[in-house]
Amino acid sequence: MVDFIHLRDVDLGTLVTAAEVWATLPDRMHTQHGDVDRDVVSPLTGGAWKGAEATAAIGELRAMSGQMEDAHTEATALRTVLLDAASDLRTAKEHLTKAIADAADQKLTVDDNGGVHWTAPSYARNLPPDDYDAVTKPLKEAAQGIADRIGRALTEATAADQRAAFALNADTRGDDPKRFNGKAVGAGPAQDARRATDLADRLMMLSPAERGELRNLLAANADDPAFSTPFLNQQGPRGTLWLAGMIAKLGGGDVPKGLQEDLRAIQADLGRVLAAGTGKGPGPHVDRAWVDELMRAGREKTDIGLYSFRPYGYQLLGTLLDTGHQDTDFLRLIGQDMRAMERDDPAVWMKNTPSGAMYNGFRLDIADGHGAGLDPMTGLMAAFGNNPEASKEFFDPAKHPGEVGYMLKRHWLPDWAGAGPIPEGYNPPGLDQLGRALEAAATGQTPGGGYGLPGGPHPPHDETMRQIMRDTVATLGGDDGLRGKFAANLRDSVGNMVASYMGDGVYDQLVAKDGQNGAMFHDRDLMRVITGAGNDPEAFAVMHGATVEHAAGVLAAHPVVKAPGALPAMDVEARQAFNALGTMDGLRDESIVAAREAGVTEATWNRKYQTLASAQILSYIPHVGVPAGRMMDIYTAHALAADTAALEHGSGLSRTENYWSGWSSSQAMAEEYARANTTSAEEIADLAEDRRAQAMDTAARRLARK
């Protein structure tokens, strides 16, 4: 491991100087080789010397001439290794230097061992413990951030050092340690691809050091088409699938930790290699013939040396699709062919799974926790989750009618990766990846991996995205679909999708009088979907937060109506904002009931909901120095704060704490709205509560439960 002080103080000029010296050596050797051939070997072979001794001597001279050419090859290779190492180490040193400089800018210090230290401001020493923690928390987080960057720089330098050592050793060793190596490879993307190919071909026989070098080469080069393309071409489509199979064979069971870690990293990076080599960005890429051959191999079973199980090529490919950003055109070809194969035989993957005690805990996918990898659609959906454009195209109802419904109602392989029986409540990992794929298709964004939409601007929904969302809601909530009862690992994605469409059909449906069907959604279907997702309190918090934010925006755009001699009032749109809040409160009641029936106590539901809702508040509180003119954010922050505070303190009302928290939230927003409009908070709060309570009471009927 390269240590901190060595990387900080290293003079890379000496390494560059050594490389420059080597740069002149190959040319001199090449010149000398030409001189020997022209001035010595050629005259002798032309007849100037004859006989047995001449033949033997000329043979020796030719061998010497060949060694001079091999020396030229080896010297050229060593020069590229030194230059490549200097470049990689320079990059690592720059990252370290920048981290140290940023630490100084943040009033942090870095010691000679790379430790990062912070000093609390003098006034903080006399603060109570909670306040002291609050003051020093940013300093601790900043120090940890710098420490992480220093760690990454040292890891980069260590990997570069190991690659150079391996390359130098391989190029100078050759077949005969006493002779120059005419097969020396050198360094650079194409040369690294040759080394990686040689190692990959011998995967089953690699020593730990060689396996570590393969891991190192893939990690450093996987995203570079100049490496990935020659690597894939040298492996070939079938060789690539074979390699994926060998990784699974070696690491798909109970193996030593070090071996497992290496193989997981190699499998994940092989997926990145596939993405870079089949993409359409700058640099070389495999041709269409390569992809066509991969598709043919995908439909065939591959012998990976297991006793009674030969996976389809597509089952192996599925383990590689979930890392890297797979190309849209590549996913179109692969995805449609996999889908066609399944259309011909819906049980094709189920019928080709390993059985017997010897396969207990066996898995093809060892890299990422997406299950055992026997259902290739899991990997395909993961790839779609990372590529919204490809996902939208795959689920486009105009091109592929019924695809959303089929996938949501499809029988997903359990893909249980454990050694024991499948636990109660287990959901196939493919459903989780399907949720991410649908979220990407319907929102146009790569899911952030959890609850809530990614930050930054959200792309507008086009008609294809809207139709995918309509089909999703109709399938999950419709009488011909799942009627609101869908897998738990779909709920986070569904909650995010509902939040994304709050201003594009969902809010309009929430305020719909008597549950009339809207232009986007059938009312009961949407109510069922919100309630079904709301079984997960954190998913409900995302949907509720989006409702509150949108309602606050409506209030900010519709001031209180004031007329001489009349009580203050709200226009239709302002009143509807509280309709929406009431509908969500009613659906929250229904979600809690459903969760309770599934064994989740109301206290647990409320606690999880409160945790995520509290975190949302921070994004709406105006920052110091920012004009407080965004009334929408102020209304939202007050409403969410009141909502979570009510859950924390409980209530004395006859209904649930949910009623109390909803009432508190609505009242807080109404009172802040009234203050902003310099009018009676009591009158506005009463009007708001009347609308909220009515909407809350009708929510159950809209679910067809009353």
Image (cartoon, helix red, strand yellow):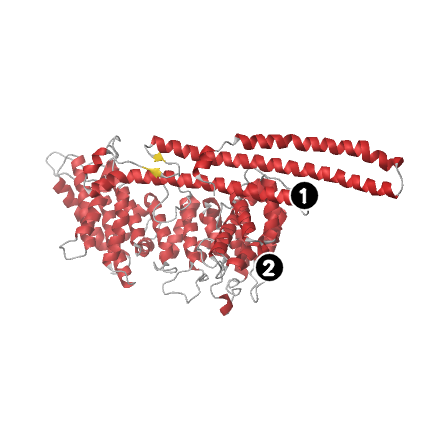
Nearest the viewer among 251 and 339 is 251
- Disc 2 vs disc 1: Cβ atoms closer than 8 Å? no
Q: Residue at x 14, y 55 (%)?
A: 653
Which residue lies under the disc numbered 2? 300
Residue 668 figure quarter: top left
Observer-side mark, 2 or 1, equals: 1
Dot 2: element:
loop
Picture residue at 58% right of the left edge, 47% below the top = 196
Q: Which mark is residue 413?
A: none
**Closer-to-camera residue (230/470):** 230
The C terminus is located in which quarter? bottom left
Decide if residue 334 is on the left or right side of residue 518. right
Indicate which disc, 2 or 1, sits on the residue closer to the N terminus: 1
The answer to which quarter of the image holds residue 549 is top left
Residue appearing at x 37%, y 36% in the figure: 111
The residue labelled by disc 1 is 183
Q: Nearer the viewer, residue 566 or 81?
A: 81
Image location of residue 63, percent across then percent down: 77, 41
Any part of residue 423 in sight: yes
Position in image of residue 584 (x %, y %): 26, 51
Q: Amino acid at mark 2?
A: Glu
In the structure shown, which secondary structural element does the residue marked by tag 1 occupy?
loop
Which residue in the rendered view is the most extreme toward the bottom?
A: 356
Say above or below: 39 vs 700: above
Q: Looking at the picture, tell me which residue is in the foreground, 60 or 590.
A: 60
The answer to whether residue 417 is left or right of residue 556 is right
- Label 2 crowd (10 A; few <14 / some 14-19 / many >=20): some
**Amino acid under label 1?**
Lys
Picture coordinates of residue 317, whole percent (x, y): 54, 54
* Observer able to see residue 575: no
